[in-house]
Amino acid sequence: MRAYLNTISNPWRVFDELMGDFPFDLFDTAMRTRTGRFPRVNVWESEGGLAVQAEVAGVDPEKLDVAVDANVLTIKGEKEQADGSRAEFQRSFNLPFELEDAQIKAAVKNGLLTVTIPRKATEKRKIAIEKL
């Protein structure tokens, strides 16, 4: 029915070809963030470690899963939508330092998940200088 798309004289042909290669995944991620199907996240790094806050309003804390594996923090959850459907989400972050696994804490308050990740203490050692 749309024969004009196949003709050489179609002024929109170039636009159609460009849009065929466009990375629509960028819009999909932005749409999931804006609609609440993909939680917004803030990350702060300090000398003591890292703090991650994610908006998880409406998510049952029992349906949240926070895990660290090989210096990758993963936050998973499931949120029930207004229409009765369920939307699952997952966010993963590469951590820029070695961490203390036993001291990682996560808490939910007023729809805000806060994960605190302390740095692994490193010992500074003095290197002896040899006189030649």
Image (spheres, grey):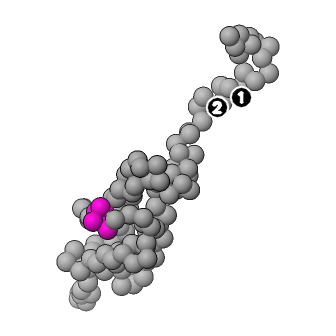
- Residues packed near mark 2 inside 10 Å, few (<14), some (14 to 19) or many (20 plus): few
How many numbered callouts?
2
Q: Which mark, by number, is residue 19?
A: 2
Q: Is residue 51 left or right of residue 10?
A: left
Quick check: marks 2 and 1 in contact, CB under 8 Å?
Answer: yes
- Residues packed near mark 1 inside 10 Å, few (<14), some (14 to 19) or many (20 plus): few
- Establish if 58 lies above or below 51: above
**Residue positioned most to the left:** 102
Q: Name the residue under label 1.
A: 15
Q: Quadrant of residue 122?
A: bottom left
> At which x and y percent is residue 19?
64, 31
Q: Quadrant of residue 49?
A: bottom left
Q: Quadrant of the C terminus?
A: bottom left
- Establish if 74 lies above or below 52: above
Q: Residue flagged by tag 2: what amino acid is it? A: Met
Is residue 127 magenta-colored? Answer: no
Q: What element carries label 1?
A: helix
Q: Give the range drawn in magenta.
A: 61-66
- Establish if 85 lies above or below 53: above
- Residue 50 showing in the rendered view: no
Q: In which quarter of the image is the N terminus?
A: top right
